[in-house]
Image (cartoon, rainbow, N blue to C red):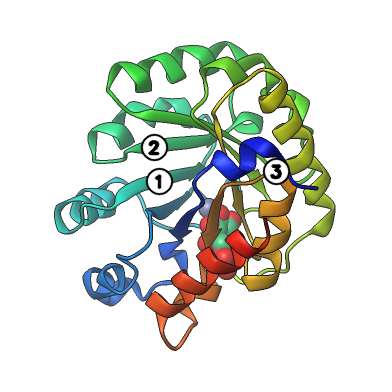
Amino acid sequence: MVYDSQVKQVIKIAPSILSADYAKLGVEIDSVSSADYLHFDVMDGVFVPNISIGLPVLECVRKVTDMVLDVHLMTTSPTRYTARFANAGADIVVFHVEAEAPENITPAINELHGLGKKAGLSIKPNTPVEAIVPYIDMLDMVLIMTVEPGYGGQKFMPNMLAKIAQLRDLLDSRKLTCDIEVDGGINLETAKLCIEAGANVLVAGSDIFGAENRAQRIAELRRSAVLGL
Ligand code: DX5
Ligand code: ZN
């Protein structure tokens, strides 16, 4: 299904450095600089069964790139840290609605906006779109996880396409310009399906970092997404 608003939306590609070689992160980031966003996955080993990177790494990354830093917090009670990630150089801070008490969510979004940053909420595969609806007017981005968060290289869950389409309908009916980001198992084939369903920001870790020519793969993902229209 193709939506009119989709044609007006710009497709953005966000390589996830979870699949990069952290021992040479600066070089790895340069290799994907033709993309739009740099996706930065933060995992605490509690909200998800894996531990990744945090504030000190973000500060270093900020110094070596002008790319838009898209920080995805997979952490418990994330709003304790949202302002700190913003101040460490994030341009967009996305956190999980399941991980936070409802009363803390709106203040954190306002705080991020007050710092001049974009704010997003993410939902895991078993969380319905309804969970983010109370905040939808305030959000710059909604991240629909297309795998269980925690690890790169997992298989895309096709039943997430209906959630993307549901959210796209909701945004269109309210004339909201909020981005729909998808994350997990994105490759040339699944990118196209997600764009058709209404997403406009594609996170890809293993597909981009595992490609022989990363710049070429970024271009191919963009092209496949556009052809999907
Ligand atoms: C997984 C992370 C993703 C991960 C995606 O929990 O949020 O950003 O890097 O990896 P791929 O693209 O390999 O599925
Ligand atoms: Zn992510």
Q: Tell me the amino acid under the disc marked 2.
A: Ile
**Residue at disc 2, secondary structure:** strand
Label 3 residue near ligand 1, CB within 8 Å: no
Q: Which residue is label 1 attached to?
A: 70
The C terminus, quarter of image: bottom right
Front one among 174 and 210: 174
Q: Does the residue at mark 3 contact the one at mark 1 (Cβ under 8 Å)?
A: no
Query: Label 2 crowding class (10 Å Cα cut-off): few <14, some 14-19, many 20+?
Result: many
Q: Quadrant of ligand 1?
A: bottom right
Q: In this view, does 80 lie to the left or right of 223?
A: left
Q: Does the residue at mark 2 contact the one at mark 1 (Cβ under 8 Å)?
A: yes
Query: Label 1 crowding class (10 Å Cα cut-off): few <14, some 14-19, many 20+?
Result: many
- Whichever of labels 2 and 1 marks the residue nearer the N terminus, that label is 1
Q: Which residue is label 3 attached to?
A: 124
Identity of the residue furthest to the bottom in this view = 212
Q: Residue 92: which numbered mark, if any?
A: 2
Residue 144 position, x and y percent, is 66, 44
Q: Tally the marks.
A: 3
| 3 vs 2, front mark | 2
Note whether residue 124 is visible: yes
